Image (cartoon, helix red, strand yellow):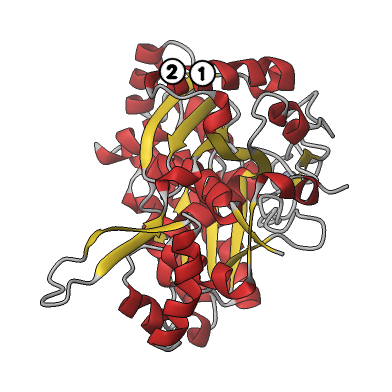
Amino acid sequence: MHAIQATREKRIRVSEEEKRLIDQVILPPESTRTSLAQALGVSPAWITKTITPLIERNLITEIGPAAGSGGRRAKILGINPAVGFLIGVDFGATSLDVALSGPDINLAGQKSLPINIDAGPEICLKAFHELTDALLQEHDLCREDIRGIGMGVPGPVDFAKGRVISPPIMPGWDDFPLPEAIMEQFPNSFVLVDNDVNLMALGALRQGRAHDAENTLFIKVGSGIGGGIVCGGRVYRGASGCAGDIGHIIVQRNGPLCRCGNRGCVEALAGGMAIAQQAMSLAKSGESPLLAEALQQKGGALSAVDVGAAAAQGDVRALQLIDTSGKYVGEMLTHLVSFYNPDVILIGGGVSKIGHRFLNAIRQVVLKSASPLATRDLRIEYSSLGDQAGIMGALSLAQQNLFYVG
Ligand SMILES: [Zn+2]
């Protein structure tokens, strides 16, 4: 049985109309009865008829008066906090973030630990429990108070089953029953697992700049490169859940060897790992004095962010490295723009901390090479959620799935 189906007993059953209303209530900005009627294109009578049973069931509540609502004060509506708490989990290759929130997904607390995802699921889940227990203790809660858990992992996920499938960097995680293992410890909660970049796209869609953008690409440039696709306001996962695996689009024939076995993949040229390797050779050869200095100070390893710092001080080779990396990402995106015609492309992940020159290099190539109609209204920006995109996406996934139509 699919994990999503298996967890229905842990979720809250509502009608189709009620779900439509709830999905609107949970979106920013804050909703009133009037704003809901406008957003959904329905009559005030429809709102009253649909919302009354939800208020009676303690699922929706009036959380306060709307600002400037005048005479008969309009009330801001929200999910009733009594519904329970949510946990968002963001597993990275080297770090773990866990956040606790109410059903409104405003953060109550967040904790992080360095981990090594290669250590396998048992050890990584221990770190997850350590952080979660600490958060629960701080807020005087117990595991039974948690109603939903959303989790992102840095690998391909069969979303319906919540299983990691043949991940390139996560030995021991293949087909591991993550939702089942976690649900054993959280008896009142469902657990949904998704690929980290899909969750970044979801986080950006729900909270960030892509909120009003129906068709968004979220590009994570971390050690590797991945993409999350928002289509018609929803995360698009594809037939097998691996849509957006864009890091291995080839942008240079006979280019450097990629970990996938092909040559010239965009990830092998412009991913964080590739940028760091090129920075190391520029430092060791002395071609970049500032990177050489940084390497000496750090004693061993450089990252893309060091390249950004050297470039900010005018280091010629660091500037060139950023321009070329941006150019390769831009070339890959040109193909995606022609194929998908997005409203917005959001760039996130560690390499986005390298500075605005990288973004400008990407923009230049896309605007020059993609078709004028596809780029006329296209925005290419860094994600405004920064490091929080994954965790906000994980909480959003839990929030969206608290309620199901049945
Ligand atoms: Zn590759």
Task: Determine the secondary structure under disc 1.
Answer: helix
User: For the residues marked 2 and 1, what is the alpha-carbon distance in whole angstroms?
Assistant: 6 Å
SS category of the residue bearing label 2: helix
Q: Position of residue 31 (x, y in %)?
A: 33, 68
- Mark 2–mark 1 contact, CB under 8 Å? yes
Identity of the amino acid at label 1?
Asp
Task: Give percent across and percent down for residue 399.
Answer: 53, 51
Q: Quadrant of residue 182?
A: top right
Residue 133: mark? 1
Q: In front here: 148 or 279?
A: 148
222 or 390: nearer the eye?
390
Image side of residue 124 versus residue 386, left or right: right
Q: Which of the numbered marks, if any, corresponds to residue 137?
A: 2
Q: Is residue 284 above or below residue 329?
A: above
Question: Relative to residue 393, is residue 48 drawn left or right?
Answer: left
Horizontal side of 312 relative to 181 (left or right) equals left
Which mark identifies residue 369?
A: none
Q: Nearer the viewer, residue 287 or 72?
A: 72
Q: Position of residue 143 (x, y in %)?
A: 56, 25
Q: Amino acid at mark 2?
A: Gln
Residue count near mark 2 (Cα–Cα under 10 Å), binned few <14, some 14–19, many ≥20: few
Name the residue nearer the viewer: 292 or 378: 378
> Which residue does the image show at 73% across and 28% down from the upper left?
170
Q: Please tell me in which quadrant of the rendered image residue 119 appears.
A: top right
